[in-house]
Image: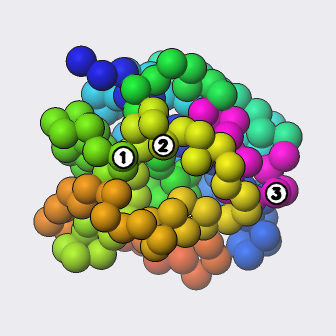
Amino acid sequence: MARAVGIVMGAGASRRLGRPKQSLPLGDTTLLGWVLRDAEASRLDDVVLVLGGAAGAARAAVEPVRARVVLNDAYGEGCASSLLAGLDAAGDADAVVLLLGDMPGVGPAVIDAVRDAWEASRPWAAIARWRGVPGHPMAFAAEAFPELRGLHGDKAVWRLRDARPERFLEVPVDAPIPADVDTWDDYVTVASRFAAGA
């Protein structure tokens, strides 16, 4: 069986929100804590949590069970720097599965579905397709790592998909795509939805 490592991207500077979003309350945990818990509940072989912006507060607000925490000192350079830190920590993985630390609601079942779909045919990459909308999580085979290491800035993996969509196996998910939290209004909406049990 392939060794698949989850990389939880939790190093953002929260510029648009105006305060560190990783430690914002969500249900019985935090925004980042919710994503981390789902990753740890999946069948991923290992989980790496990448922190950077507000790392101290973010680390104090989560309780990793099996995840390893790594720091990305270059987080100001964009998401690609966190991906690089995660790849360094993933070691000799056969694949990595990327999860956004500000996108709760993906759930272990979807993480496992993307990982299993990747493992079944070992494509260059696999991506969830939420009722027709592509989104995270994304899985990348080891053969993609050199190209991932050459990325810079934000939304870098999306540029790869836009340039060569045929390399991405789409994994259908019969649910609306979870919202990611970029602004305070996003957080209020997501927190209300989770409080209502949606």
Range drawn in magenta = 74-87
Mark 3 or mark 2, earlier in chain: 3
- The quadrant of the picture occupied by the C terminus is bottom left
| Left or right of residue 88: residue 170 | left
Magenta: main secondary structure:
helix
Side (left or right) of 135 relative to 51: left
- Residue topped by disc 1: 124
- Is 76 magenta? The answer is yes
Visible in this render: residue 158?
Answer: no
Q: Is 167 placed left or right of 79 in the picture? A: left
Q: Nearer the viewer, mark 3 or mark 2?
A: 2
Q: Position of residue 103 (x, y in %)?
A: 47, 59
Mark 2–mark 1 CB contact (< 8 Å): yes
In which image quadrant can residue 50 be found? top right
Judging from the image, what secondary structure is the residue with disc 2 in?
A: helix
The residue identified by callout 3 is 77
Which residue was labeled with disc 2? 144
Report which quarter residue 44 is drawn in.
top left
Q: Alpha carbon of mark 2 to alpha carbon of mark 1: how far?
A: 6 Å
Q: Amino acid at mark 3?
A: Glu
Towards the viewer: 24 or 88: 88
Q: Is residue 104 visible?
A: yes
- Disc on res. 113: none
